[in-house]
Amino acid sequence: MKNIKSGELLFALIFFITSAFLISQLPDQVKWFKNTKITSQPALWCSIGLIGMTVFGFVHLILNIRLNNLTKDLKEGFIWVRSIEFALWFLLYVVLVQYIGYLFATCIIAFCLSYRVGYRKKTMLLSSVLTALSIVLVFKTFLEVKIPGGIIYEYLPDTLRNFMILNF
């Protein structure tokens, strides 16, 4: 019996579902022209590729269903899903920058992520905020990367608002 790695059944299932979905979209996405040789059709290679992906993905899925341990794959799947959390942290960061600005958003997210991954000592949390501050200084102040200011800057006095938008 072949040694199956955890997550292989899950990968085979996701691959087959994705390729089956893509093949179902072929009639709406590609064109077959009348009176044109088959080798000149724009849809030919897309169709061949997706048919191959779907057929071989199905074979791979069937072989893994018979040979695999479902409990092991479910544990692996939960690990994959948990990694989405960090993409959500990034999306939160992008939203925060619009409202509270690059400086505050970077410091808050750095602090929260440091706390989230297990750092609890004040020195480590302070280090994360200082690192975030130095990142902001390097990118926004020294490299002059153009990042829009947050809505919160509108409530500052004019001279301070301009300074914060330009440098932080």
Image (cartoon, helix red, strand yellow):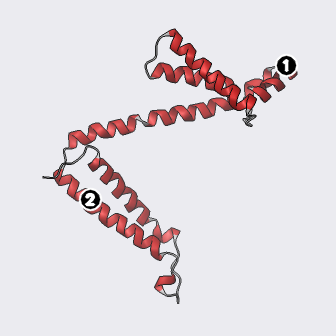
Q: Quick check: 113 above or below 147?
A: above
Which of pointers 1 and 2 indicates the residue nearer the eye? 2
Give the residue at mark 2.
60
Residue type highlighted by circle 2:
His
Quadrant in which residue 108 is drawn: top right
Rate crowding at label 1 as few (under 14), some (14 to 19) or many (20 or more) other CA atoms within 10 Å. few
> Do labels 1 and 2 touch, CB within 8 Å?
no
Q: Which mark is residue 69?
A: none
Say which element carries label 1. loop
Q: Provide residue 57's location: percent of width, then percent of height.
A: 31, 61
Q: Provide residue 124's location: percent of width, then percent of height.
A: 51, 14
Q: Quick check: 157 above or below 27?
A: above
What separation in Å lies between label 1 and label 2 (alpha carbons)?
64 Å
Please indicate whether residue 38 sits to the left or right of residue 14 in the image: right
Q: Provide residue 131's location: percent of width, then percent of height.
A: 60, 22
Give the residue at mark 1.
157
**Residue located 74% across and 37% down the image:** 146
Please indicate whether residue 16 sits to the left or right of residue 149 in the image: left
Work out whether mark 1 precedes mark 2 in sequence or the reverse, and give the earlier one. Answer: 2
**Residue located 27% across and 40% down the image:** 74
- Image quadrant for the C terminus? top right
Q: Residue furthest top?
A: 122
Residue type highlighted by circle 1:
Pro
Q: Quick check: 15 above or below 155?
A: below
Rate crowding at label 2 as few (under 14), some (14 to 19) or many (20 or more) other CA atoms within 10 Å. some
